[in-house]
Amino acid sequence: MNCKAVIIGGSAGSFQVVTKILNSLPRTFPVPVLLCLHRLKHVRSGFVEALSLKSNIPVEEPYDKELLKPGRAYLAPANYHMYVELANRIALSTEDTVNHSRPSIDLSFVTAANAYREKLIGVILSGANKDGAYGLKKVHDNGGIAIVQDPNECEVKTMTQSALQLTKVDFVYSTDQIISYLQKLR
Amino acid sequence: MTELGIVDIREIIRTVKSVHDYDFSNYALTSLKQRLERVMNNYGMASADSLIKKITHEPAFFDVFLYEISVSSTEMFRDPSLWRWLREVYFPEALDKNIGKFKIWLPDCVSGGELYSLAILMSEMGLTDKVQITATYISDKVLEILKNGSYDTKKLEVSEENYKRANGARELSAYYRTDKTGIVRNTSLLANVELRKLNINFDNAPQNMKLILFRNHLIYYNPTQQEKVLQMLHRSLSVSGHLVLGIRERISGISASREFEIINETESVYRKRILN
């Protein structure tokens, strides 16, 4: 597969999983990784530092219109939506919350799906609401690869189950399977 | 839900420009697309054509359109640490040295979150009579809503929390009342505020501003337009006047970054650089 980006969405129970994924990616991971994880609106710092600790690739909270580069992870900043704009740039937004969330996983996934079409891998992890289900459907509808963490492994199943209800996904994977899938990307 | 393609969006932008002389071509496309789709949904339009027809043939609709596609910015006292800094550091120092009215401008003022927060802060600091606040926007309808004080109930809870974290002197409820339409903010806070329409090119922008609050507006422009807007703001600022951007907004364009220097990294506060 000719992949241009990986996008991962998660909420309650996803932190350990994301940490493990970032810890297992090769230093020269060939594409950018977008992370849209629910977080407290008013706590600006600490999250990106915590994710960076064990990550093999640099993790940053992007500034608006920043260019996406391969081998880096971009975490949606607190209280902003994170979109993928054309020409491989990030666009941030303070538009209304969606499903009570800002960042909204749906919005990040939908805009990434529009930008990357079939060259996108979308992954939905453990979480406590249905945010991300619609976004993952859009990834799938545009020909991208839709992956859902195995609900049996999730600390909170709501998010993955909602995604599975809405879309006939490509893979239901354990964390280890997600990792080995991503490790094969060239 | 209607989905617009790039071709549709370009056609809508072209129509708006040729009929109304408003140029949206340098807006950030992704968020503009979402807002256009929202308008079409709200008005039950199935295709870009129906929107284009309405924009072309119904002059009164255009102001409504400008209102509908504006981003209602977020809660009051967003980023409480900025408001604490303004209260505890910035204003005491800036007003101490100031002679005459201290002029403040809020361009692209949509939901009034920033405007009412600032007015409350000025009132609590006893500075209302020492500042002249100007708030501008492109749509009359938005300005009307600001004037009548109505506010989105959904945003209240977060606003209350923000206000506490911003070391507000009272309770936020001292500044609004609830009636059957929802929340109505105390409009007497805006007694000395000038609210006026300003077109998309910022023609006749206010001048000699000591402070411009422009948080989370640049994000809705593409890099070309960001640079243009920054240059317009630069012209409006007085010597060493200050510009506050959103915390994930940075001035990075080559010419613009020569014209501003950052003085507070955490809160994205810039000072107009004096050019030699």
Image: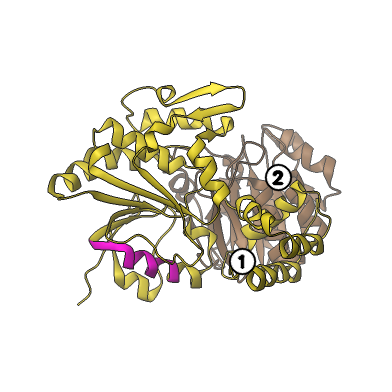
User: Which disc, if any, is residue A31?
Assistant: 1
Chain letter for mark 2, please: A
* Tag 2 secondary structure: loop
Label 1 to label 2, Cα distance in Å? 21 Å
User: Is B82 displayed left or right of A30 in the figure?
Assistant: left
Question: What's the residue at 33%, 29% (across, down)?
Answer: B168
> Pointer 2: what residue?
A132
**From the image, which quarter does the C terminus of chain B lie in?**
bottom left
Q: Residue furthest right?
A: A168
Q: Does any portion of residue B121 appear in the rendered image?
A: yes
Q: Colour of chain A?
A: brown
Q: Amino acid at mark 2?
A: Gly
> Which range of residues does the magenta coloring cover?
B228-239
Can you tell which mark lies on residue A10?
Answer: none
**1 and 2 marks in contact (CB < 8 Å):** no
Chain at tag 1: A
Chain identifier matching the yellow colour in the rendered picture: B
Residue at 66 percent of width and 36 percent of height: A127
Is B276 situated left or right of B143 in this image? left
Verify whether residue A11 appears in magenta: no
Query: Which residue is nearer to you in this view: B60 or B259?
Result: B60
| Label 1 or label 2, whichever comes before in sequence order | 1
Could you say which quadrant of the image residue A6 lies in? bottom right
Give the overall secondary structure of the magenta segment.
helix
Number of the front mark, 1 or 2: 2
